[in-house]
Amino acid sequence: MRIESLHSVTSARLVMIAIEATLRTAAFAFANPQIGLLVVCDGNGRAAGIVSKSDIIRHLRDVGATDAPIANLMVRNIVSCRREDDLYDSWQKMAARNLQNMPVLSGDCTPVGVLDIRDALKVLFEQEKYQEQLLFNYVAGVGYQ
């Protein structure tokens, strides 16, 4: 299964902020409980970095300034996936790096969504359940339905 099959979910989780934005602006974006990651974009609309809720909390704990530019605390080394990537492979990448969210980027690094690990797991479990039912029907002699 490809990530593009989750487009309606991943695109709904996408929030982009300008690289010139402040930490306060980022904090307001996180007011929505469905949002776990912000994609920081340059002037051309391409991903320049990401900011998580944890990044903001760490910054507030250590520095405390809410007018700080988001560019000062964003992660520039973006771990991402593409629409055409396999969902299971992307989930493995997230699990290996202990990520809750991962941006979905197009070929030119334009953000198109954010994959949440819970959404990935839900779809993967549903897929497994379906495969299990097919196998059960086959073994029971019912055949494929």
Image: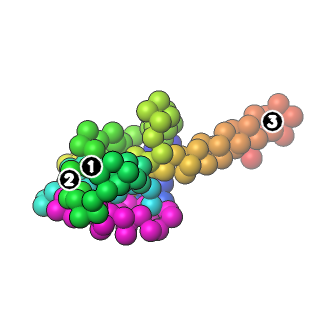
Q: Does 33 appear above or below 77?
A: below
Mark 1 belongs to which amino acid?
Met
**Magenta span contains residue 32:** yes
Residue 61 pos. (x, y %): 38, 51
- In the rendered view, does 132 fall on the left or right side of 51? right
Mark 1–mark 2 distance (CA, rounded to whole Å): 5 Å
Magenta highlight on residue 37: no
Q: CA distance from mark 2 to mark 3?
A: 53 Å
Question: Helix, strand or loop at disc 1?
Answer: loop
Q: Which mark is residue 136?
A: 3
Tell whether label 2 touches label 1 (CB within 8 Å): yes
Q: Please tell me which residue is depicted at 75% across the width and 34% down the height of the picture.
A: 135
Secondary structure state at the residue bearing disc 3? helix
- How many residues crowd mark 3 within 10 Å: few (<14), some (14–19), many (20+)? some
* Residue span colored magenta: 12-34
Vertical side of 32 occupied by 137: above or below: above
- Quarter of the image for residue 45 reads bottom left
Tell which circle, 1 or 3, labels the residue nearer the N-terminal end.
1
> Badge 2, how many Cα within 10 Å: few under 14, some, many 20+?
many
Task: Give the residue type at disc 3.
Answer: Phe
Q: Nearer the viewer, residue 98 or 4?
A: 98
Q: Nearer the viewer, residue 129 or 71?
A: 71
Picture coordinates of residue 94 (x, y %)? 46, 37
Front residue of 67/73: it is 67
Residue type, mark 2 in image: Ala
Q: Look at 41% across and 49% down and name the residue there.
A: 54
Label 2: state its secondary structure.
helix
Residues packed near mark 1 inside 10 Å, few (<14), some (14 to 19) or many (20 plus): many
Q: Which residue is mark 2?
A: 71
State the residue position of label 1.
Answer: 74
Label 1, label 3: how far apart the Cα atoms are: 48 Å
